[in-house]
Image: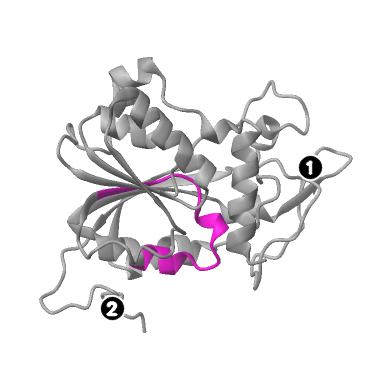
Amino acid sequence: MSFVQRNRAAWDRLVRAGSQFAKVATDEQCRDPLQALDGRGWLPASVRGLDVLCLAAGGGWQSILYAAAGANVTVVDLSPEMLKKDEQEANRRNYKVRVVEASMDNLQMFADECFDIVHQPVSTCYVSDVTVVYREIARVLRDDGLYISQHKQPTSLQITERDERHRYVLGLPYYQDSSLPLVEDESYRESGTVEFLHRWEELVGGLCRSGFVIEDLTEPYRGDPQAPLGSWRHRGLFVAPYLRMKSRRIPRIAGENSRKPLWTPP
């Protein structure tokens, strides 16, 4: 079974088990959807009429909020169970949301330059090559299109255990040639999934080389000084688990083949 098939099956199981990542948008959030989606002010003041791709974002939260804000919404996800929640919630609220079952690194079903915004939660850890994802997003985004993404930090994925002095052990090499092995500390790993570590030069440098300019980068705070020792909130005090990036598609050069990077580093 390929890692794609294993991740699809794992996420289907997680949804059926009531995963926190498959909670649909609430009525309160739908009353002010952009605030729920974007507490950092990265989105435009209105997304009404814009074409939005919620990438690897099934589960009935992100797609529903964009639809509530008046966007033309497409959601892509690997998991049929996740997409089922988008469909059910969209039908319940009488929203129009297009759902597509696909891996985030293969968007061949979409034409070039067909979206104004691509919004992607933590998900690139489930694909082996993040630069392929970036190239596909660069292709389907229009010039000056917005790409908002969240990723797992590489250092967080290197942690394997907590020692007797409650220190977190960096037990996996930074340079990984394959998927990550099972480890004792799975605070920021999803059960049953196959994950990959992407280095900073891939997460940030790869984005720039694919035709984007980064406008902002943040590290969401997940620590709690009062959290029990060994809990995920305790671990969050020592290593930031995630990063968020706001980036924008550089306008294309005349004659550019948008399936390739704008330039190749020396």
Q: Could you say which quadrant of the image residue 47 lies in?
A: top left
Kind of element beneath mark 1: loop
Left or right: 99 in relation to 124: left
Q: Nearer the viewer, residue 225 or 31?
A: 31
Q: Which amino acid lies under the numbered mark 2 shown in the image of this protein?
A: Trp
Kind of element beneath mark 2: loop
Left or right: 54 in relation to 122: left
Q: Nearer the viewer, residue 107 or 254?
A: 107
Q: What is the x, y in percent for residue 115?
A: 22, 53
Question: Does 22 sit above or below residue 179?
Answer: above
Q: Residue at x 66, y 30 (%)?
A: 233
Q: Residue at the far right: name it.
A: 164
Question: Does 224 sit above or below residue 167?
Answer: above
Q: Residue at x 28, y 26 (%)?
A: 94
Placement of the C terminus among the 4 image quadrants: bottom left
Q: Which amino acid lies under the numbered mark 1 shown in the image of this protein?
A: Arg
Give neighbour class at mark 1: few <14, some 14-19, many 20+ (Cα, 10 Å). few
The stretch in magenta equals: 117-135
Q: Are marks 2 and 1 in contact (CB under 8 Å)?
A: no
Q: What is the x, y in percent for residue 146?
A: 25, 50
| Residue topped by disc 2 | 263
Label placed on residue 167? 1
